[in-house]
Structure formats: structure tokens, C-alpha cells
Amino acid sequence: MKNIFLKLPLLLTITFTVVFFTACEEEFIPEISTDPEDIVVEGFIEGGEQPTPPYVILTKSLPFFSEINNDEFNNLFVHDAIVTVTEGSNTATLSEICLDALTPEQQILVGSLFGIDTDSIAVNFCVYIDLGFSMMGAIGKSYDLKIEVENKTITARTTIPEHVPLDSLTFVKPAGEVSDGLREMLCYIQDDPDLTSYYRYFTQVDDGPLTPGFNSVFDDLFFNGQAFDFPLSKGEPRTAEFDPETFGLYNVGETATLKWCNIDDEHYRFWETLEFNASNQGPFSNYTRVDSNVEGGLGIWGGYSVSSYTAPVE
């Protein structure tokens, strides 16, 4: 879960473009931002087949031009915050836990929850979580997050929306000249005509981590109320080497799991703008501000309604 937000003011982007075109032979050293660090929130709660308690990761933002090593990364985590989540009359206080304070068995459990390999991670990953499981995500309910830290109060609200499940999924040979051993995931759905639905998905191969699709979110603007089939690309880490022959495809013999989610509008806007920004880098791209539903900080507090599907790739 990448949760370092890099700040690049719009004025800096404009300045870089002007200098590049007017004086390409001159070295341009932009002024480094000295703005105070913002608190970055990455928190979620899930309802559906396997509901989860709320959990929140708190870090500090970095200026755009920053170098970072493991020690500096550890220092980004925000400690000793008072974090509460309220739903109706029920309030849960989240406790901070860090990997270094856990037994190896507990570290494995935390790693499975957050999709991280605790054997290879080089930082002391910290998270705020409802250890007593006093609050579990439920479809149709809204959750208010409140964080008090460093003389700041940060708030956000999210709703776990109604769920629109898939009818089924299968695997087909993709079009074009590809290896006989590769397959594409094909999903079937009946979209609810009475809902404005926002979707996000993750995939897993065998016992590997859950990985979001390269473009993992979409809405039902163009297919509201329709029944149809559509392909879903296998989630690939953005750091993985791109191979156009195999990207997004599965190997015959693997077991694939699809985590299929509905999210609310603000949650959707966050991922839509974040993924657009990540896919459009470089000096000639447009500046995109990532939407946030967090007041007093940056980031996302999001609810998921979830169903999961597992099938062999044949």
C-alpha cells in the first residue's frame, strides 16, 4: 500500500515547462518546497462476505524532490494518534501496532491482512486497527473517522454502498497471436438500474498478494442497468517489467481470485485521479490533483462492499 503523497505545486510545473522551452541549454534547479508536512491518511473498512474492522495507516507527506532510505521511511509513520471510528452510537478506538512489536506468527497474520511479505519488508510497518473487532464493516452503513494528533484534528466519512455482484467469471483465449498457454478473464454482470455504481477490483494468483488492476476503478455511466460480459486484466505491480505479450493475462494451470468491490463516489474519485496521475507522468503531462475526502489532511478513508470469486485458469 503506497501512501506517500508527493507535493508538486502547479506553479512549479508551469515554471519548469517555460524554462524547458525557452532555455533548454541552461540547468534548471527548482526551488524545493518547505511547506509543513501534511498528515496522510490511508484507511479502509470492508463489508460483505468477509467484513473487516476499520484500519488506518498514518504517514507524513514528502516534498516532490526528496531522497528516502529505510530509516527515513520509518520516520514517516505517525505515532501516538488518537484514532476513532463512529457508526451511529457505536465508537471504536483504534490501537497502534507495529511489526517490530509482534511475534512472527502475529506478523504473518498482519501480512496476510495487508498483502505484504513480512519476511522481506525492510521497514517497521505501523497501522491503527480495532484489535477488539468491536466494529465490523456492514453494507449500507456510514462511518466517521476522527484523528487527533500533533494539535490537529482530521476527519472523514465514508459509506459502504450496496453491492452488485458478478454473475460469473470464466477464462478465454485472448484475441490475436498469443501463446496457447495464456488466458484472459471474462466476467458477466447484471448492473443494477436503480443504483449509480462505482467499482474497484483486485486479483490474486495462487497464494500471491492481492493486486489492483492497472486501471482498477470504473463506474456504470455507459452500462447502467445492462447485462453484459467484459474482460478484466490481471493486476500487475506498477514496478513490474512491462511485457506486452503477457500483460494482464493468466497462465493455464494457475488459480485466480478476483476481489470485486463497490465503493462510494468520493472513494471512486480518489482512485480515479490517483491512477490517472500515476499513468500520466513526465514534463509534458497535465497536472492532476488527487481528490481526497479527508478534512485537515490528505488521503482516503474508504469503505468497500466486497465479494470474492476463485476459479482455475483452464
Image (tube, helix red, strand yellow):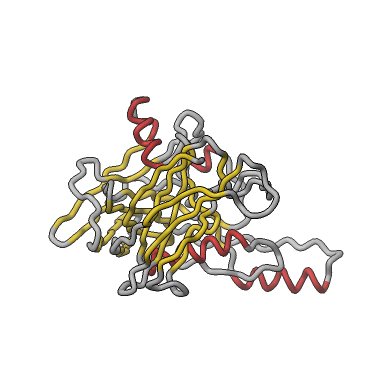
Is residue 296 something that shows in the picture? no
Give the percent coordinates (x, y) of residue 16: 71, 68
- Give the residue at x 40% y 56%: 41
- Give the residue at x 60% y 43%: 182
Give the percent coordinates (x, y) of residue 294: 37, 64
Seen from the viewer's position, the closer of residues 47 and 71 is 47
- Give the residue at x 43% y 44%: 257
Spot the residue most to the top: 104
Left or right of 20, for residue 103:
left
Seen from the viewer's position, the closer of residues 191 and 303 is 191
Give the percent coordinates (x, y) of residue 27: 80, 61
Is residue 72 something that shows in the picture? yes
Give the percent coordinates (x, y) of residue 302: 35, 59
Seen from the viewer's position, the closer of residues 252 and 210 is 252
- Give the residue at x 51% y 33%: 122
Seen from the viewer's position, the closer of residues 26 and 45 is 45
Residue 63, quarter of picture: bottom right
Residue 19, quarter of picture: bottom right
